[in-house]
Image: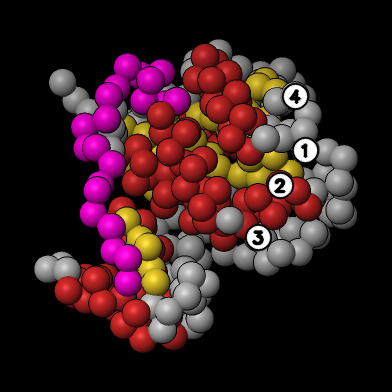
Amino acid sequence: MRNLKICLDPGHDKGYNPSPCGFGYAEGTKMFFFATMLKAALEKYGIEVVLTRRRVEDNPDLFQRAQYGEGCDVLLSLHSNAVGDNVNESVDYVRVYYPISGKEKELASALTDTIAEVMDTRQAPQYLTRINSNGTADYYGIIRHSATLGVPALILEHSFHTNSRSTKWLMSDANLMRLATAEAKTIASHYGLKMIKEESEVRYNTLADLKAAPNSQHYLPTVEKLIAKGYLNGKGGSGDDLILDFSEDSIRILVTLDRAGAYGE
Ligand SMILES: [Zn+2]
């Protein structure tokens, strides 16, 4: 039996759609990070995952993105929403678009509920289709192009980066990890898949623990870069006693993001 294959499409490109609320949020950057986390979470269920952007700077057009999804069971396009260009604190809900063919409507419904629950959004979530003005095809390019290639595509709008609450929420990598875990679980259960790889028990408390690990040469360049940039000193300690409190899985995600250009040179 062939593995389930999913295409993840982090929307836009690096720095695109900065939040008017600030906090350093940009949709095109954060959704790339989130896609990396969701890929890792889906792979634990034996799901094969392809990404439409290999590096955070990549920005293929919508048809190219759909082509990455060819042969996949579903394509998920990852976004956060906006009401105009300004801050709007009152609009805070999840929306998922599914194809007018009705394919994967149930998955759209399940993911809508999961995202709203994990993000704790203020208004009721929605899942819906949107048709073009001629009434002939899907309105959104990624869904329309994917449909012509025989692939159902969903657009997941992770609430609105025009309200401070959701923007701040999406800026937390710990929140994004929880979201990735929850979405993967919902997707796996929709397709009847069980986790093949249990959550890794390996944890590194301090930098010295990581240096002592047999596979540390794969991780140290990234971790040392993040330390030098001041990204990892929130938990206390210094030098080899710097407290990391990392699982092996979270270090792997950091290394993947580093290779994808997320942390610069
Ligand atoms: Zn978007």
Task: Confirm whether the magenta stretch covers residue 192.
Answer: yes
The x and y percentages for residue 24 are 68, 66
Q: Which amino acid does label 1 sit on?
A: Asp
Name the residue tied to disc 4: 124
**Residue type highlighted by circle 2:** Ser
Q: Is residue 187 above or below residue 120?
A: above
Q: Name the residue under label 1.
A: 92
Seen from the viewer's position, the closer of residues 137 and 190 is 190
Which one is in front, 138 or 207?
207
Tell me the tag on residue 166: 2
- Contact flag, marks 2 and 1 (Cβ < 8 Å): yes
Earlier sequence position, callout 3 versus callout 1: 3
Q: Give the residue displayed 86% in from the left and 53% down from the top.
A: 87
Amino acid type of the residue tagged 3 in the rendering: Ala
Is 22 on the left-hand or right-hand side of 153?
right
Secondary-structure class at tag 4? loop
Q: Which of marks 4 and 2 is nearer the N terminus?
A: 4
Is disc 1 in contact with disc 4, using a CB cutoff of under 8 Å?
Answer: no
Answer yes or no: disc 2 within 8 Å of ligand 1. Answer: no
